[in-house]
Image (spheres, helix red, strand yellow):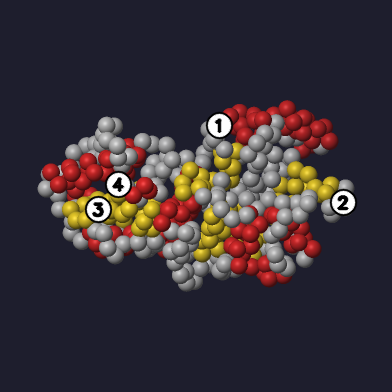
């Protein structure tokens, strides 16, 4: 029973409160979990797939607009006892009852497929849940319904994203994400993959619908541990990105994110004119870690010592700079360098992940020109570039 599957059927965007709940649970649990978030799937299909591909002894299915504490999984397992199916009803949107389920593997031997079937003639949006409950009753499964002693409700019932914020002891560092009321599915899956494969505990701080400068200052004020990893809610990444940034062992270490709109320039900047005031996108990036004049804060690790030296407010808007660049300008005044590792694989979500390959596909003529110019200047160190790699399918996966 130590291993199981956690399912939250999702669309392209996930409510911030639901994402916060999931990530706090994954960050604190000692159990081995498989996360299944059925992006773009018809809700009953997501639930059926989660049962079909169940890993471990049970599947916990949670609605996609639920807010729950990091202890909900333990509460659900305790309440289930020896029952095959346990139902957790709560009041949802528009005073419609919603349901979470804990379904044991042994129940699948008795249940008929498809497990969840939606009746298009019913006015209830989640009528597949009621149909599932009725099927369990009809075939005589051991089922109990639990309404007390569980921390779950609809997202509209709680005022703050950190309403149920766990006390984290021994956090090695902080993961900070400023958010609006929703975050991208890909961000949630990237974070979930990082957390289920981690053997340490982090402090996770997410904000909801706050001005960006205010949100970043709030996150710094609530950080714990020796570093803060800024990761934006519209980014996706491989599970080793955080550790690779920490391995650089410098006060400020970042990866490369690309703008979401054409021409998809990297959010990395070089200094212009040597005046310490002007900068421009770096269009040709080194292949090894390098010092950048400026960066955005989409994916950057900043050590605690930096915040100890920089004056408050850390982040604020100025006439010429966004809140993140304003902060990094202040760090430069204290002699800190910004080290960028181009090996960090980060995607910036629109309808597709925007990454290095998107950037170069769009700017292919510039790429060819820069390679030709480089080869002309240094004929003894010619660059051989295989353009076919730009058209390979993205390797972001979970």
Q: In the rendered picture of this protein, how many numbered marks are placed on residues?
A: 4
- The span from disc 1 to disc 4 (Cα, nearest Å) is 31 Å
Q: Is residue 334 left or right of residue 49?
A: right
Q: Quick one: SS at disc 4? A: loop
- Residue 351 x %, y %: 54, 35
Badge 4 or badge 3: first in the primary sequence: 4
Q: Which residue is mark 4?
A: 54
Mark whose residue sits in front, 1 or 4:
4
- The span from disc 1 to disc 2 (Cα, nearest Å) is 39 Å
Q: Quadrant of the C terminus?
A: top left
Badge 2 or badge 4: first in the primary sequence: 4
Q: Residue at x 39, y 61 (%)?
A: 69
Mark whose residue sits in front, 3 or 1:
3
Q: State whether residue 248 appears in this view.
A: no
- Tell me the tag on residue 274: 2
Query: Does the CB distance between marks 3 and 2 fall below 8 Å?
Result: no
């Amino acid at each position: 029973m130590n291993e199981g599957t956690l399912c939250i059927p999702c669309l392209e965007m996930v409510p911030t409160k639901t994402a916060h709940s999931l990530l706090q649970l994954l960050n604190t649990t000692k159990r081995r979990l498989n996360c299944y978030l059925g992006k773009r799937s018809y809700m009953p299909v997501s639930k059926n797939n989660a049962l079909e591909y169940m890993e471990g002894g049970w599947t916990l299915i949670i609605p996609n607009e639920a807010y729950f504490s990091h202890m909900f999984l333990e509460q659900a397992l305790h309440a289930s006892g020896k029952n095959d199916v346990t139902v957790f009803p709560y009041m949802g949107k528009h005073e419609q009852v919603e349901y979470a389920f804990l379904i044991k593997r042994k129940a699948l031997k008795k249940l008929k497929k498809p497990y969840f079937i939606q009746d298009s003639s019913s006015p209830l949006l989640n009528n597949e849940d009621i149909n599932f409950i009725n099927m369990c009753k009809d075939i005589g499964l051991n089922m109990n319904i639990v309404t007390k002693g569980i921390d779950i409700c609809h997202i509209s019932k709680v005022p703050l994203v950190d309403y149920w914020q766990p006390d984290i002891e021994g956090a090695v560092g902080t993961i900070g994400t400023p958010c609006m009321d929703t975050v991208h599915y890909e961000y949630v899956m990237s974070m979930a993959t990082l957390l289920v494969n981690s053997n340490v505990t982090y402090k996770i701080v997410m904000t909801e619908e706050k001005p960006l400068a205010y949100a970043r200052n709030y996150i710094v004020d609530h950080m714990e541990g020796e570093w803060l990893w800024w990761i934006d809610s519209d980014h996706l990444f491989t599970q080793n990105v955080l550790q690779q940034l920490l391995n650089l062992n410098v006060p400020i270490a970042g990866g490369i994110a690309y703008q979401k709109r054409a021409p998809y320039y990297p959010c990395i900047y070089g200094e212009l004119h040597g005046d310490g005031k002007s900068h421009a996108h770096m269009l040709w990036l080194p292949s090894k870690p390098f010092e950048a004049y400026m960066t955005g804060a989409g994916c950057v690790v900043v050590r605690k010592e930096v915040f100890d030296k920089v004056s408050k407010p850390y982040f604020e808007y100025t006439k010429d700079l966004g809140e993140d660049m304003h902060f990094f300008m202040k760090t430069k005044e204290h002699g800190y360098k910004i080290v960028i590792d181009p090996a960090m694989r980060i995607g910036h979500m629109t309808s597709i992940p925007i990454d290095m390959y998107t950037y170069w596909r769009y700017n292919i003529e510039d790429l060819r020109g820069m390679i030709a110019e480089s080869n002309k200047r240094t004929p003894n160190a010619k660059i051989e570039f295989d353009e076919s790699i730009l058209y390979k399918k993205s390797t972001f996966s979970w």
